[in-house]
Amino acid sequence: MQALNHVAFGTLIALTIKQPVLVAPLALSSHFFLDILPHYGEDPKAPKNSAPYHFRILIDGLASLLFIALSSSTFPEYMPVILVGSFFAILPDFFWPAALFIKSDNPLWKFLKFHKRIQKFESRRGIYVEVGWFSIISIIIINFFSALKI
C-alpha cells in the first residue's frame, strides 16, 4: 500500500480512538492489514531504483505529509494523536532501506522478509484498490467527523 493510504488509515484510527496509547499499536497493526490487501506495486514502467520509482516515492511522501497537515489543521485539537496514528501506520516502511545494509542473520532481516511475504497481491492493477481505499477513508473522515463537529 502506498504511504498515503497508511497515513490516511492511521489518521482515521487516531480520530476514532483518540487515545495515543491505543492508537499506536492499532495504527501499527493496520499497516500489515493494508499490505495484505491487493495494492499498487512492482510497476515495469517504474522498476526499483529508477528515476520514475524515486519520483513516485517522493510524490507519495509529499502527499502523505500534506494529508497529515490538512488533517491536523482541520482537527487541531487532535493533532498529537493524528501524528501518533500517522507515524505508527507508516513506521514499518521506514525499515526498507535497512535491507541494503543488514545481513540475513539479523532479526530485522526476518521482519523485512515477513513484511515482503505478506504483500502477495502487489500489481499495477492494485492502483484501483488504492484509489478506492483512499476515497472511502477520506469520505469517512470528512463527512463523519465533520458532521459530529469533533
Image (cartoon, grey):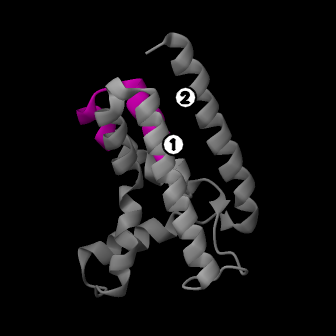
Give the image quarter of residue 146.
Answer: top right
Instruction: Please tell me whether residue 89 is drawn above or below residue 74 in the rendered image.
Output: below
Instruction: Please tell me whether residue 86 is drawn above or below residue 117 in the rendered image.
Output: above
Q: Residue at x 41, y 74 (%)?
A: 113
Image coordinates of residue 82 in percent, x first then y, are: 37, 36
110 vs 69, left or right, is left
Q: Residues within 10 Å of mark 2 (few under 14, many from 20)?
A: many
Instruction: Please tell me whether residue 145 is drawn above or below residue 25 in the rendered image.
Output: above
Q: Is residue 13 visible?
A: no
Image coordinates of residue 134 in percent, x first then y, are: 63, 43
Of helix, strand and loop, which one carries label 2?
helix
Q: Residue at x 52, y 67 (%)?
A: 58
111 vs 116, left or right, is left
Q: Residue at x 60, y 83 (%)?
A: 51
Q: Which residue is mark 2?
A: 141
Instruction: Look at the numbered discs 1 and 2 and tell me whether their residues touch, using CB distance below 8 Å.
Output: yes
Q: Which residue is mark 1?
A: 8
Image coordinates of residue 112 in percent, x first then y, are: 38, 72
Which stretch did the figure color magenta?
7-25
Give the image quarter of residue 90.
Answer: bottom left
Label 1 is placed on what type of residue?
Ala
